[in-house]
Image (tube, rainbow, N blue to C red):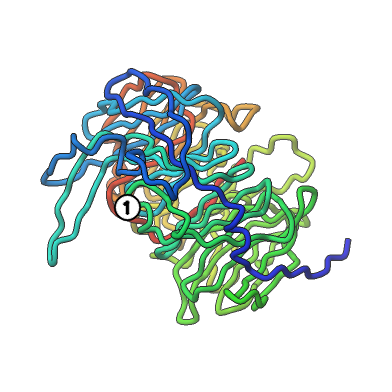
Amino acid sequence: MSLHRRTLPLSTAVLAALVLTSCSTPASTGSGADTPASPATTADSPSEAGTPGADATDRQEVDGLAPRAVLTYDGGIMAVDTETGDVLTNTESEGFLRLNEAGDGRHVLVSAGKEFRVFDSGLIVEGHGDHDHYYEQAPALTGSTVEAAEAGHVVAHEGKTALFADGSGAISIMDTSAFEDGRIDADEVEGFSTDDPHHGVAVPLTSGDLLMTQGTADSRSTVQVVSPEGEVLAETTDCPGVHGEAAAMPTAGGDVVSLGCENGPVVYRDGEFHKIPVDEPYQRSGNQFGSHESPIVLADYKTDPDAEQERPTRVGLIDTHASVMTTVDLGSAYWFRSLARGADGEALVLTYDGELNILDEESGAVLHEVKVVAPWEEPEEWQSPAPTVKVGADGFAYVTEPSAKKLHVIDVAEGTLLDSFDLPETPVELAVVTGEGSHGHDHADG
């Protein structure tokens, strides 16, 4: 099928249709649920719900911050102190919820059907000249939301955060610092759009340009870089089924972003798109994980176009600067929530045998094999609970074990299991916040 270029200039007209709402959701501590939200008000009408957290009166200064894990379960969201294992809050919320780090080290954006909800972890860092002060308060939904048809993926990249609505193609971009007060106001958002609705993604580049996918609900093969004025600066149509992106170490020419396709990945580097050669006619790396410390992107590696549920044992290591990819066979399968990156660029993969494999991303050598969870398999439905791996800015890895209702903490550098905590609910999604903002974004989706 031939593809032709379709260009829609970036326009703030989309912003006029973007409705930002703010509704109050008081916090509770322990295992009780939050009270129901009050009727929504527009973001232009300030309300108490817009303040950080649900109630800042419990804010207290501390000498340092313990990372907090935010987890979804069937029926709600909970936040856990990863040093003590204490459940700090438990908020009832219906529907399937997805978690995305906002990029500021404090807030998590919850993809919830027709909106993105802002969740405040309660970890606060305030700079005072040559030093910082640290504060904690109860985690809670702030009440601030961004309406989005089929709220999809969130990308936090170099001080900007982009929200993508699959059902409309609308892209909402804001400074990551906009989350500081727990609310999103209309004047803090730039609205853009793709040509047609599709399951896509957008990445704000440090140049001020925007990398975004183009496609439809039935087909997507195009990735563009577009200037603020709407000029297409770079484009590839050779990325069938485009899905999955990750930022890697930049070059002197600017940002480096890798994207997954069904005929091998494509990399945006030095203002152009570069195709990564693969041996197979079908090769999908739809889940990618990058590090600003490394040119290497970790990716899944699927090669069977007819598989209803492929269970690969190989992972890909994409050298985004050299435009080559190598593979490592771990001898045991994994799924899309199995992959993560360490603070020093290490490649992490949790396999069916229950081991967290910690690889040197350059050589592919396995540095550590840490027995973490009981043997498991990917569920038939990707929304169902199964082990998930995330790495915080502290460099520790956090792994859920839904079958045992546990959260595990691993020292990546040492390759040791540090702690295991019991959870009151069966975890599904996981995000880890430390108070320290992130530089890039990794895209994982089933």
User: Residue at image x 39%, y 39%?
Assistant: 119
**Quarter of the rendering occupied by the N terminus:** bottom right
Three-letter amino acid code at the position of disc 1: Glu
Q: Nearer the viewer, residue 365 or 139?
A: 139
User: Residue at image x 72%, y 54%?
Assistant: 262
Q: Residue furthest front?
A: 45
Q: Nearer the viewer, residue 275 or 205?
A: 205
**Residue 196 in sight:** yes
**Residue 349 in sight:** no
Q: Position of residue 232 (x, y in %)?
A: 67, 76
User: Residue at image x 57%, y 60%?
Assistant: 191
Q: Position of residue 250 (x, y in %)?
A: 46, 72
How busy is the neighbourhood of tag 1: few (under 14 within 10 Å), some, or many (20 plus)? some
The residue wearing badge 1 is 180
Q: Is residue 175 above or below residue 138?
A: below
Left or right of 44 on screen, residue 97: right
